[in-house]
Amino acid sequence: MTSRRLWLASLAAASLLLPLAARAQYPERPIKLIVPFAPGGSTDIVARLLADQMAPILGKAVVVENRGGGGGAIGMDVVAKSRPDGYTIGMATVSTHGSNPAIYSRLPYDPVKDFVPVVNVMSVPSVFVVHPSVPAQTMPEFIKLAKAKPGHYTFASPGNSSLGHANIEHFMDLAGIELLHIPYKGAGQAASDALAGVVHAMTDNLPSTLPNVKAGKLRALAVLSPQRSPALPDVPTYAELGFTEMREGGWFGLVAPAGTPAEVVKTLNAAVHKAMATPAFQATMKEISGVPMAGTPEQFAAQIQEAMARYRRIAQKANIKLD
C-alpha cells in the first residue's frame, strides 16, 4: 500500500513538472518577428539588427516578416491575433502604440489589452528633410516659404496616423503653416519620392534617412529629440527653434500577444538585454544615433501609456482623426 501511494505521489509530481519542463525548453523552433511597416524603414532596420543578435542567444532563428499597411495597424493586428506562445512577436512603435490609438477612431487591435509588453529597445530622433530643390537652407526659411504659399509645399510620411504624420500636423499647428500631406505605405516609398523630388519634404526616423542626408540628396532642417544628434551636430532640434512642445522622437520595442506566459516574456526580455550588449548592436546603435531603452516589461507598459496620452493631446489640438 505504501509503495502504491509513493508511486501515485511520484506520478502526480511528475505531471506538475511537465508543463514547467516544456516551457523551460522555449524556444524549440524559430521565432517570427512581425515588422508592421515595409522594408527599408527605421523599424525594419532596428528589427533586423535585433533579430540577428538575438538568434545565437536564444539558439533559434528570429525571422523578420514585414506586414506593412494601415500605419502599422495591419501588422500589429497579426501579432494580436497570433497564438500566445512566444513564437510570434511584434515590433511596436510610437505609431502603433501611441499615435494610432489617438488618431484612428477604429483599430483592429487594442494597444493595451491585446498585447504583453516585453521590452522597449531603442529610441531614435526623427528628422525633417527637404529636397535640395527647395530654396530653404534652414527651418525658419522653410516656414517663411510655406507661409507665402499655403498648401503648395508637400510632405511625405510613412502613412496616415504614422508618427511622421502626427508630428508634422503638430508642427504645422505650432508654426502656423499649411503643408499638403502625402501618405505612403511605408517609409521606403516615402523616401523614394522625397529623393526624386516628387514631394518637397519628408519626416522620418533618423536611421533610415541619415545616409541620404550625408550624401547631400536630402537637406535636414530639424531633428525631433531632446538634444541635437551627434550624427547631425549642425541641425537644431525643434525645441531650439522655438517649438518646445516637440521634444521626443520615436522608439521601438517588442510586444507579444496577450496571454503569452510570463516565463516566455522573461526569456525574451533577457535575450534582448544580452543582444543590446553585443559589440555589433552597440556599434550600429551609435551609427544611427540610437539611445538604448531596455528596462522591464512594466516600464515599457508605462511608456506605452505615456505615448498614448501625449498623442491624444496632439490629435485633439491639431484636429487629426481618421476612420
Image (cartoon, rainbow, N blue to C red):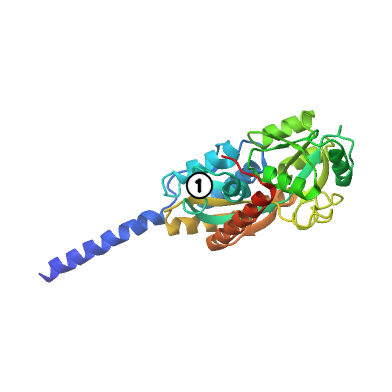
Question: Can you name the residue that lies furthest to the bottom here?
Answer: 2
Q: Quadrant of residue 263?
A: bottom left
- Quarter of the picture holding the N terminus: bottom left
Residue 66: percent from the left, percent from the top? 56, 37
Near mark 1 (Cα within 10 A), the count class, few <14, some 14-19 or many ≥20, is many
Residue at the spot 64% in from the left edge and 52% down from the top edge: 311
**Where residue 46 sits: x, y (%)?**
64, 46
Q: Residue at x 13, y 71 (%)?
A: 2
Q: Which residue is mark 1?
A: 89
Residue 151 versus residue 23 in the image, above or below: above
Q: Above or below — where is 263 with respect to 99?
A: below
Choose between 166 and 43: the one closer to the eye. 166
Q: Amino acid at mark 1?
A: Ile
User: Residue 114 location, x and y as percent?
Assistant: 47, 50
Tag 1 secondary structure: strand
Residue in front for this viewpoint, 239 or 148: 148
The answer to whether 56 appears left or right of 243 in the picture is left
**Residue at point 85% right, 43% down?**
143
Q: Residue 273, can we see it?
A: no
Residue toward you, 287 or 112: 112
